[in-house]
Image: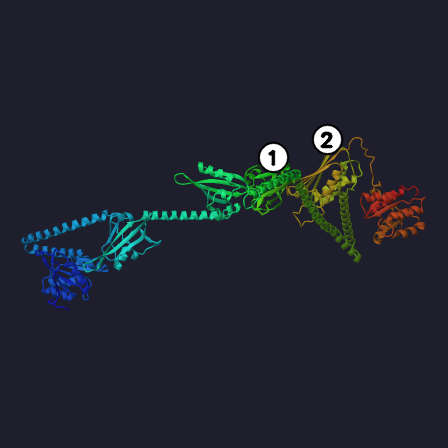
Amino acid sequence: MRSAQSAPVKQPFNTSVSSNSPAYTILLVENLSSDREVYCRYLLADSSCHYILLESSSATEALLICQNQHIDSILVNYALPDANGPDFLQMLQMQFDGQHPPVVFVASENDAAMAVRAIKLGAEDYLVNQTLTPEQLQLAMRSAIGANRRGELGANTPSQLQPWEQEEQSHLQHLNRDLTSRVAELQTLIEILPVGIAIASDRSCAQMQCNALMRQMLGVNAEQNISKSAPAAEQPRFQVFQNGQEIASKDLPMQMAAHLGIEVRDVEIEIRLPDGTSRQLLSYATPLWGDQHEIRGTVGAFLDITERKHIEAELCDREATIRRQFAELEGIYATAPVGLCFHDTDLRYVRINERLAEIDGVSVADHLGRTLREVLPELADTLEPLHHHVIERGEPILNVEIHGMTQAQPNVERDWIASYYPLKDGNNRVLGVNVVVQDITEHKQAQAEREQLLRQLEIERRFLEQTLQQLPSGVAIAEAPTGRLLFHNDEAIRLLRHPMDMSETYSGYANYGALHPDGRPYQPEEYPIARSVLIGEVVKAEEMSYRRGDGTETVFSVNAAPIVDPSGNRVAAVSTFEDISKRKQIEVERTHLLAEAETANRSKDEFVAMVAHELRSPLNAISGWAKLLQTRQFDPPTTQKALETIVRNTQTQVQLVEDLLDISRMVRGTLHLTLAPTNLAEVIEVAVETVRPTAEAKGLLLKMQRQQVEPVLGDLHRLQQIVLNLLANAIKFTPEGGHIQVELTQSDSQVQLQIRDTGKGINPEFLPHIFDRFRQDQQDTTTKQGLGLGLAIAKYLVEMHHGSVTAESAGEGQGATFTVKLPLQEPGKPDAGEPERVDGWERDQSALPSEQPLNDIRVLLVDDEPDVLNLAAFILEEYGAVVQTATNAPTALEQLPYFQPHILLSDVAMPEQNGYELLQQVRLLHPDKQIPAIALTAYAGEARQEESLRAGFRQHLTKPVEPEQLVTAILNAIDNDPHYG
């Protein structure tokens, strides 16, 4: 550490300092000698003061100097090796008891906050080292010393302040006037210069000032800092680019000049403002040097060259355009498929392309410089007048057809099309003629061929049109891709029954209003012909519903396909359509019939299953009781019960077979009626009494109410069957405790039978099918309901009597009403005692005597079934007959001579010889004595019965036969035989 006495002293070197200037002692406290040198140079450059400068490198040394010498002011670095600014200030205050010399701190940017703290502790001022200028330091020191002097004089001798103040104020006023004048001159110069000027007062260029033109170019106001090196919060919003890339702040011209200490010249930059506009600037920058040749800032000049750059760009574009046009012209001349040339006003060739040289038959080189007549003497008389016309009038001549010969093909006539255009200068003076020539020889030949082809095509078109008009389908042709209709035949109009839509595009198809099979309307692009036109789809047999012009509905089957040219491009589409409504109706009917057939087959299958069930049920009872009676001995009541069960189930099976036979006759149409006047009231009364025991056994109340009605013409047996079937149906479906009401009335020309019950009723869905064959209500599949044939048979028989039967029901559980209406006997029909047809026996079966009615009657019984044969023989013998049995026809013929039967009972279906053949043999053996014969067979039906009668049998009995019925038939046959007796 230096002693106070050894502190270096620097005297002023500025000779311009006045001898009357005040002298002040300044202590410089800085550990860096280079910074002390800078401070000394800045202060000694002040011409308004005389400074004695003392130097110290530490706080301790500075305090010792202050103890031994008078100090007017202290300039101290904020960060000393042995103390910081506030600590040094506190030690100084303690040493002088508050009356210390004024202190000015020099601090870095990072220490600014601490410097502010030092001011609060009593420092006069602080300066930032990085931006410190000589003027700032000089002013700060003069201010600190002046403030301190005024304080001292005011405290001690107020009367001494006036002369000092006058001297200082006078000196300062002189300096201020001089400085103000110089600054004003400089500012005026800067403002009027036609270039942008920017000045940075520090080497880092963190703060920049600029003139008005520069602010205008940068789009900033006077208060804004224009430096891109400023802190982020202060930076302006414009951007700087060079060659399309944004420039970093350190690479800007002024920053480079300040950093490198060099002049930057002719650097072009682009300024992009926030509003999207930009300017091109030519920039210059140079560093500002201090007294010690240090860089203290930089100044930059910026010339707005935006307009110049635009002009340069336009010139470049024009030059490029001219070069491009020239290249295009050269390219056109080189590649044009037509002949091109230029003649001057003397008709000399100046330019010609290869194509025209080929047409002329002369090389390009042999054209240039020669006249039209020299090159084409054969055509000169034709061509020269055309050139002269264009040159003299300045008007073009277009599309002149020329015919002649050239050297290219001597003695060959060719054709050309030529056009002539004048070339003029800026004064509208003709400089020459541009000629365009096209050889059209082949074109004219092709045109002639095309005309011939068009004539042929027209013939074929007419042929095609006439062919399409003869087609039985509607035909339409539309062009691609618009869908515009080109053709339609007359059949199309006849099918649509309105004119075709002639819109320019397929969007007009919406007017047709066709529907898809599911009812959706066709969109214009969905029509088959539109799809063929637009996407080339082939449509086959697409069905669409259509309302024709007369309002009728129909169905069209539509086909469509694209029409392509030889290159495969779609040029049109053709569509054909035909009315398939009748075919659709047939298909619907066929589908309906098929469904009905399937339903019938299904019903028949169900019916077969029911038949099997209905056959097995009584057979089970018959078979069971029969085996029990065969293997065991029962008491009389049990035996009687078994026999009754067997008889009852046998009758059930007989009725079942009869119903099946009736259905078979109904299907084949062979069911016949034996018509006679019939008292329907008696038929109904017998039927009611027949079923009454069954109804009462079930707990049903059966009532009958009838009027006296006139006879009807009908089959007694079949009418009784109708009533019994309806009553059986009512009893079956009426639960215990129910009621059944039978009413017979007459009105006008018909009688009406109504049977009402309080039974289970009829499902509304099944009601329309109540009389169908093979149909039953399937609501309850677990209940035994029989075959369900009774109602179908009843309806068929009623209609055969020219009547009607209907069924009504309010629903399930609401009972049912069946109504039969039959016409009365028409006048002129036979009386009641004159039947139109009888069954072949009239004897009342109930009138058979209790004794043996067949006593001593010899019966020849023939059947190939032993069980049936034995049963019939037993029955006949029980009634007193003498029976001889035979199992076939030969055996019967052998027994015939010695047995001499009174009557023959024969089965029809037997092996070797059937019953018909047996009867023929019998008639041949005894031609004088015709033995009566009865056919006893399982074959039923009117046709079978008629066949038996034609063969010679007196009667036709269907197995199984009740004993009484068999006895009655035998007695009737013998009674009518004149040989018996």
**Pick the front one: 536 or 323:** 323
Q: How many labels, in total?
A: 2
- Where residue 361 sits: x, y (%)? 53, 47
Residue closest to the eye, 583 or 308: 308
On the rendered structure, is 902 left or right of 587?
right
- Amino acid type shown at disc 2: Asp
Q: Which mark is residue 748?
A: 2
* 710 up-or-down from 759: above or below: above
Q: Is residue 586 left or right of residue 236?
A: right
Residue that protrudes farthest toward the bottom in the picture: 1
Nearer to the camera, 306 or 379: 379
Where is residue 140? Give x, y as percent. Answer: 16, 56
Q: Secondary structure at mark 2?
A: loop
The quarter holding residue 590 reads top right
Image side of residue 739 versus residue 245, left or right: right
Q: Residue at x 41, y 48 (%)?
A: 323
The mark that comes first in sequence, 1 or 2, is 1
Task: Rate crowding at label 1 as few (under 14), some (14 to 19) or many (20 or more) other CA atoms within 10 Å.
Answer: few
Secondary element at image label 1? loop
The C terminus - image quarter: top right
Please state which of the two labelled residues, at mark 1 or mark 2, is closer to the viewer.
1
Q: Amino acid at mark 1?
A: His
Coordinates of residue 223 in the picture (x, y in percent): 24, 49
Rounded to the nearest angstrom, the CA distance separating label 1 from label 2 is 56 Å
Can residue 879 be seen in this snapshot? Answer: no
Residue at label 1? 498
Residue sitting at x 83%, y 53%? 867
